[in-house]
Amino acid sequence: MPSPTQRVLARVPARLRPVLVRHRRLVKFLLVGGGCFALTTVINFELKFTVLEHKPVVALTIATVIATVVSYVLNRRWAFRAQGRRREAVLFFLVSAVAIAVNDVPLAVSRYVLDLREPYVGAFTQEVADFLSGMIVGTFVAMLFRFWAMQRWVFTHLAEPVATGTQPPLEPGYAAHETSREVPGAR
């Protein structure tokens, strides 16, 4: 029975498979990030349009903090497959605190320096500016910082792979080895 990773790779065009396997840690990091981006967006809008209507930076910060906790669990267990250590968690949340500040800066500049808020602009323009500055620009810059910092300082000790007598040890950050079994639809 092929692993979930092998089943997904079987559906990817053959010429792209080696690139995805070679950069699997980045691919997994981006998948975790995409899911956390969606989570952040939903929570941010829920807070921004209800209890934190006049505090968009606070709403974005709370949404980002919640998604950061989810990101820690998924990155540690799947994308980076790191061993759990107290130092790792402390470093993760320190890096994430800096990344949250980085994420908030474009929204704060948009709202309070460039005055892209009501009554200076219309409600639609304000919401578009908030989304572009906070969710797109802020998230992109914070994502670049996080990936670099996570690899450099946080997830430096990878989990020991479990070796069986029939297969070589798993590579760090990869769910399973490619096997010689034919996977349906792999051509």
Image (tube, rainbow, N blue to C red):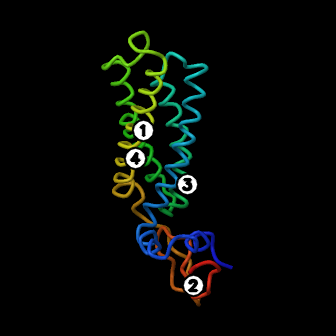
The CA span between labels 2 and 4 is 33 Å
- Quarter of the view holding residue 97: top left
**Where is 16 relative to 54, above or below?**
below
Say whether marks 2 and 4 touch (CB < 8 Å).
no
Q: Tell me the crowding category of disc 4: few under 14, some 14 to 19, or many 20 or more residues within 10 angstroms, Cα based.
A: many
Secondary structure of the residue carrying tag 1 is helix
The CA span between labels 2 and 1 is 39 Å
Q: Tell me the crowding category of disc 3: few under 14, some 14 to 19, or many 20 or more residues within 10 angstroms, Cα based.
A: some
The CA span between labels 3 and 4 is 15 Å
The CA span between labels 1 and 4 is 10 Å
Say whether marks 2 and 3 touch (CB < 8 Å).
no
Say whether marks 3 and 1 touch (CB < 8 Å).
no
Quadrant where the N terminus is found in the figure: bottom right
Residue underneath mark 4: 143
**Where is 91 relative to 134, above or below?**
below
Q: Which amino acid does label 4 sit on?
A: Met
Secondary structure of the residue carrying tag 3 is helix
Q: Which amino acid does label 2 sit on?
A: Thr
Residue underneath mark 2: 179
Image depth: mark 3 or mark 1 in front: 1
Say whether marks 3 and 4 touch (CB < 8 Å).
no
Residue at the spot 51% in from the left edge and 70% down from the top edge = 174
- Quarter of the view holding residue 10: bottom right
Residue 105 is situated, as x and y percent measured from the top left of the image, at 35, 30
Residue underneath mark 3: 74
The disc, 3 or 1, on the residue closer to the chain's N-terminal end is 3
The disc, 3 or 4, on the residue closer to the chain's N-terminal end is 3
Residue 58 is situated, as x and y percent measured from the top left of the image, at 48, 24
Residue 111 is situated, as x and y percent measured from the top left of the image, at 38, 20
Residue at the spot 48% in from the left edge and 21% down from the top edge = 124
Image depth: mark 2 or mark 3 in front: 2
